[in-house]
Image (cartoon, grey):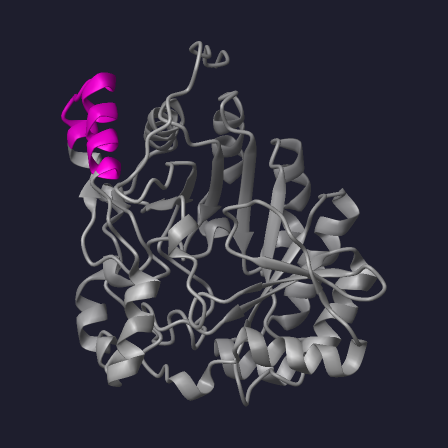
Amino acid sequence: MSPMPLESATPLVADTFGRPLRSLRLSVTDRCNLRCKYCMPEEEYAWLPRETLLTFEEMTTLTGYFTELGVDKVRLTGGEPLLRRDLPVLMRMLRQNPRIKDLALTTNGLLLAEHAQSFSDAGLHRLTVSLDTLRRDRFKVLTKRDGHERVLEGIDAAVRVGFKGLKLDTVAMRGFNDDELVTLIEYGKRIGAEVRFIEYMDVGGATDWSLDQVLSRAAMLEALGRHYGRIEPILEKSSAPAQRFALPDGTTFGIIPSTTTPFCSTCDRSRLTADGMWYLCLYAKHGTDLRQPLRAGASRDELKSRLRSVWQARRDRGAEERKELEQSGARENQLIGIERLREDPRLEMHTRGG
């Protein structure tokens, strides 16, 4: 496949709040080999029918239209993306698009050891691995699976292969892993990875979520400050979800405070599910079907026009709206019941690339 020609200038498409269309999370599967408490704790769900899943060619085509409207960052997600066969093929196809400046992947790490080299060879720029605990017993409680050693082996493989900017994502939960903040940062130091702590979010399968389980950014900084001393914020202009900080020795880490301090005002991310539904917000209950018009033969201009008009009408600020509900005590009433989640896979965070 020859590289896609660049037009003279990539137009800026902004929503009703002036937020540009810049970042696409591309889900390649809704399946996962773990059952994490904060994402998909049940054993069985309503899975997307196989015949509805986009082919790699369809994903590449749609991604190309997004990049013609300003997207330059693409992150492959799931479910667990490594469950999709021949993933390096998709990576190579996407790398043919010169508008994509950052091609990243998020994984739980279980299968990473056997794929890290092929991902590097295919041109993947960056890796993020979920690592919520360094304790095997806690991993099994959280995920309902064994495999903690395999995750650590996967991380080691990514380091050996030479992935730069490796990130470790930790969902921080009060009463579960809040005593591991320092341990995780020290582990990140040893392997040359930046840890990002994520506040526990009330979305998708987090049906047991409650505000008292949320370890806030303020609480994290206080705990880390007691151990390390003065922590300085890193001032940088970025739409990335993580706020970055530096320890006295220069070690950096991030916090994604989407529950207590939403960042909707700068959010430039949207999500394309493995079956072609486009969501403008992680909390959105409705999306735009791109698979149907694509398979019906819609032209490039028709699909680009649809993307442009939908984004320009975007008013989503899901995390801020959830935060506002706290004052009336109604936030926890927004959780979607497990039976409803079982009926509609697109309501799940793991389906829309959380």
Quadrant of residue 102 within the rendered picture: top right
Which of 126 and 256 lies nearest the eye of the viewer?
Answer: 256
Between 242 and 113, the residue placed more toward the observer is 242
Residue 149 seen anywhere in this rendered image of the structure: yes
| Magenta stretch holds residue 306 | yes
Residue 214, position in %: x, y? Answer: 47, 81
Residue 42 is drawn in which quadrant? bottom left
Q: Is residue 332 above or below residue 125?
A: below
Residue located 44% across and 65% down the image: 258
Q: Is residue 120 left or right of residue 313?
A: right
State yes or no: residue 280 in magenta: no
Q: Is residue 153 left or right of residue 200?
A: right
246 left or right of 106 in image: right
Q: Which residue occupies 17% across, 22% down? A: 298
186 and 325: which is toward the camera: 325
Question: What type of secondary structure mainly makes up the magenta span?
Answer: helix
> Across the whole image, how many numbered discs are drawn on residues?
0
Residue 304 x %, y %:
25, 24
Is residue 203 shown left or right of residue 309? Answer: right
Residue farthest right in this picture: 249
Q: Quadrant of the C terminus?
A: bottom left
Please state the extent of the stretch shown in magenta in the rendering.
293-312
Whole-percent x and y of residue 178? 61, 83
| Residue 86 in sight | no
- Name above or below for residue 71 compared with residue 213: above
User: Which residue is pictured at 52% across the width and 80% down the height?
Assistant: 215
Q: Quadrant of residue 134?
A: bottom right
